[in-house]
Image (cartoon, grey):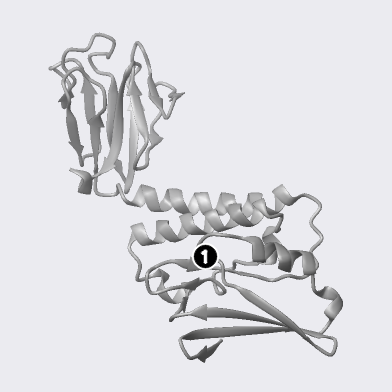
């Protein structure tokens, strides 16, 4: 990377001009939205020079990742996913994105920027070229989201007759309509069992567990197997019978 007035410049030289892919270069020019580092190409004899121009000061992602907050890290992952999806919409395979972490550039405002490397790339299945990196992104995102609940979470009702919000920081917090044998009571409900759900934090992971309730417990629409703990993340909607609750970090109190 070379520092220039008002920014930086990265130059890549292809010694074999036949490796250059004009169609990928033109596709990258059509990509819109944030995160795109513009590329200018020119020929010198048979060599292709690819020049990437960045305005402002940038740092490589590994240099700043450790100092970011979990929210900042999740924001980076979200940006990278959007860049993948935008590139795919233009027919650019994942292999043509210089998206390894050592190549990713972060601006002072926390925005992520990616380069495209327009070389011949034989990808028989375009979808397959994105599937693995997107799965890895989702795994990293889930780890970050789970970590946001490591010290506890808020279980907030969305549609109960009487609004309730339970602050859960222990290993087991029992919720139901009954007063006895529960830590949190949902009043004026009929379909919720007396002891319907257990929620808590164990080993830094937030979970909920259906207590063999009559009408079941659901996470984001999927019914839980009775007595099996299931990890939850911020924003998950947990439904007890017909009443919904949202999982929120403690900071949302």
Q: Count the marks: how many? A: 1
- In the image as oriented, which residue stretches furthest toward the top? 190
Image point (36%, 31%), residue name: 237
Location of the C terminus by quadrant is top left
**Quarter occupied by residue 24:** bottom right
Question: In this picture, is 20 found above or below 12?
Answer: above
Question: Residue 72: x and y, percent?
Answer: 37, 61
- In this rendering, position of residue 47 left or right of residue 69: right
Image point (52%, 65%), residue name: 35
Front one among 192 and 200: 192
- In this rendering, position of residue 50 left or right of residue 197: right
Question: In this picture, is 130 found above or below 114?
Answer: above
Image point (58%, 51%), residue name: 134
**Quarter occupied by residue 53:** bottom right
Question: Residue 28: x and y, percent?
Answer: 66, 65
Question: Residue 180: x and y, percent?
Answer: 13, 17
Location of the N terminus by quadrant is bottom right
**Quarter occupied by residue 196:** top left
Q: Secondary structure at mark 1?
A: loop
Front one among 158 and 210: 158
Instruction: Please rate how many residues cluster around mark 1, counting C-alpha atoms within 10 Å: few if below 14, some from 14 to 19, many from 20.
Output: many
Question: In this picture, is 116 found above or below 252?
Answer: below
Question: Residue 149: x and y, percent?
Answer: 30, 47
Front one among 13 and 233: 13
The residue carrying mark 1 is 35
Front one among 171 and 40: 40
Image point (68%, 55%), residue name: 90
- In this rendering, position of residue 226 left or right of residue 102: left
């Amino acid at each position: 990377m070379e520092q220039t007035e008002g920014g930086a410049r990265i130059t890549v030289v292809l010694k074999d001009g036949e490796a250059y892919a004009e169609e990928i270069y033109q596709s990258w020019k059509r990509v819109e939205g944030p995160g795109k580092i513009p590329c200018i190409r020119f020929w010198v004899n048979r060599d292709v020079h690819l020049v990437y121009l960045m305005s402002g000061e940038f740092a490589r992602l590994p240099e700043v990742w450790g100092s970011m907050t979990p929210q900042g890290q999740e924001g980076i992952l979200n940006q990278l996913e959007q860049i993948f999806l935008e590139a795919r919409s233009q027919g650019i395979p994942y292999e043509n994105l210089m998206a390894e972490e050592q190549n990713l550039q972060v601006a002072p405002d926390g925005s992520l920027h990616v380069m495209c490397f327009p070389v011949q790339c034989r990808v028989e299945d375009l979808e397959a070229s994105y599937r693995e990196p997107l799965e890895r992104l989702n795994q990293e995102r889930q780890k970050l989201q789970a970590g946001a609940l490591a010290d506890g979470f808020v279980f907030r009702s969305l549609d109960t007759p009487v609004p309730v919000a339970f602050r859960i920081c222990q290993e087991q917090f029992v919720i139901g309509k009954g007063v006895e044998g529960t830590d949190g009571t949902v009043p004026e409900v009929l379909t919720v069992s007396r002891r319907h759900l257990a929620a808590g934090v164990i080993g830094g992971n937030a979970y909920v567990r259906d207590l063999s309730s009559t009408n079941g417990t659901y996470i984001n629409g999927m019914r839980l197997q009775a007595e099996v703990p299931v990890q939850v993340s911020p924003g998950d909607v947990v439904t007890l019978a017909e009443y919904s609750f949202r999982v929120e970090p403690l900071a949302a109190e």
